Image (cartoon, rainbow, N blue to C red):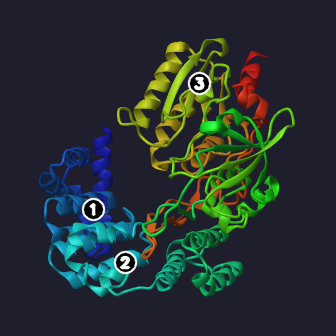
Amino acid sequence: MTRSKLLNIFCVMTCCFAQNLSGQDANNHAKFHDPDPLAYYRLGQEARALFQTGQYRQAAEINQKLVDIYPDDGTTWLQLAQSYQNSGQHQRAIAAYRQATELGSGFTASNYYQTAICYAALGQDDKALEWLEKTLNSGYMHRPNFARNDQFAGLQSDERFQQLAGLLPSREFSREEGWRFDLAFLVSEINRLHAVYRNEPLPDKFKKAHQRLNKRITDLSDAEIFVEFQRLAAMIGDGHTTLYPIAERVSFSQLPVDFYLFPEGLYLLDAEGDLKNRIGSRVVRIGDMKTDEALETLGAIISHDNKMMLKRMMSLYLTFPDALHALGIIPSPDTVPLVLETSHGQTQKVEVKPGGLRRPRKLFPSQKEGAPVPPLYLRNVGEHYWFDYLPQAKALYVQFNQVINKENESINDFARRITNALGEHKAEYLIVDVRHNNGGNTYLYPPLLRALSYFEATHENGGIFILIGRNTYSAAQNFITDVDRLTDAIFVGEPSGGKPNSPGEDTGTILPYSGVNMSISALNWQQSYPQDGRIWIAPDIPVELSVEDYFANKDPAMAAIVTLISK
């Protein structure tokens, strides 16, 4: 007997059983015996292809047939809803979104948001507002989308819509009133969104700091208020709840220098103008403080998951003079006094003038004059992902720098190329370097994870090495947690910058008065087993990057792997 006949018999038997139970559900299930199950599957494939090519009306017709036949697949209901919505059949879309939500398909808040859009398209403003409120109450993470969506253009002057969209009310605000409005909004959004504090009371230290700040706002500059807001965000205790120096009412400056915190101390990696000949110097004083004291002071306002992430973020925050001034590290934000020490022990005081904001840089090759050729791990940091075969080690070296698809090649296609290259070169080892990877979209990396698992399963005497460090964070942390859980990979380098289990996610929160951009950790990412309380993934082979190795363009972590392979 063929499998399809067995499936037909099973479906008929279960439908008959359901009919004996009586009731509406039984009648719905009974419809499933009509077509061949494989015909149902093929019909689903056709509907997906039509949807993906933008033929929404045809996709809706087929998806409607599918849910009539078998109403228990929430994914089909969701695609039906989207097909109806994209073809302008909003009333039908609303009903389909309701069914998809009841079956747990899609994100509830997103389904509610799309329902609100459908009601707005139908001209039912009260219903649209009702569903926008449900959207917020369900933890919708992208509140600014309300005001940006053209479907809600007619509601922009409505007071209820302004409140739901996180906009300022239509009245004049003094500076102090505006900042206090932002402060209240910040606290309310943390209470609404945060993965932990939407269910638990905020920490006592947060509440006390909030009360103090509310009283002090009149006496603080805009930059100082921003720093105190960031201090509140850091008290939440994770790396993704943070503010960004992007705002309409606050201007920020940044130093044209780059620092890095090595085991030997804080060093100047790059600079412009006359400071270029000071590259490689140790920073012994910042303003009125010794470097260690300044770093400790700065650490109190930096959001982080663990000490490795704190090390990474300190190097960035040190380039913001407004933050240094607000914390009392320097006397004025107009210039940053530094005391630098050369390798010969000579010290010199320099004054660094700030400029405009710059895009954050990942670690780059040594900028010292006469430095050797950059090592493999610093040659192409700007590329999202790439690989090269190392014949001397019989290894494929893969650098995975961002969990974001490239325009000309998806991560899925890249994973296929890796598998093909491993076979073509008959590689015995696979080295994956995620030391520069600070995240992206967790949902994109499974094909790469499968490529690693396949390699391990088909290479009994080979091995996988994962290079990690302080910049391995967010979606990259999720990736290495999955690798740690599913393979026997050997981890090399520093501890990672994130935790295996942690609140996370970037949300597009904007404070209404100042326009300050903010993120709140709205999701509880649990890539490991529930009891895993590790603060990072520690390396099996710990290797720190020394200041001497960095400026000499050496990679001691990679050298350790090659040595192990050779033995």
Instruction: Using the image as rendered, state which of residue 29 and residue 165 is in the foreground.
Output: 165
Secondary structure beneath label 3: strand
Looking at the picture, how far across and down is residue 520, in whole percent? 53, 67
Residue at 57%, 70% in the rendered image: 226
Q: Which residue is mark 2?
A: 167
Residue 302 appears in view: no
Inspect the image, locate mark 1, and give the three-letter code of the amino acid beneath it.
Trp
Q: Which residue is mark 3?
A: 397
Image side of residue 224 versus residue 558, left or right: left
Inspect the image, locate mark 3, and give the three-letter code of the amino acid beneath it.
Tyr
For marks 1 and 2 on the same chain, the one whose residue lies earlier in the sequence: 1
Residue contact at pointers 1 and 2, CB within 8 angstroms: no
Q: Which residue is mark 1?
A: 77
Label drawn at residue 25: none
Image side of residue 240 versus residue 538, left or right: left
Quadrant, the N terminus: top left
Residue contact at pointers 3 and 2, CB within 8 angstroms: no
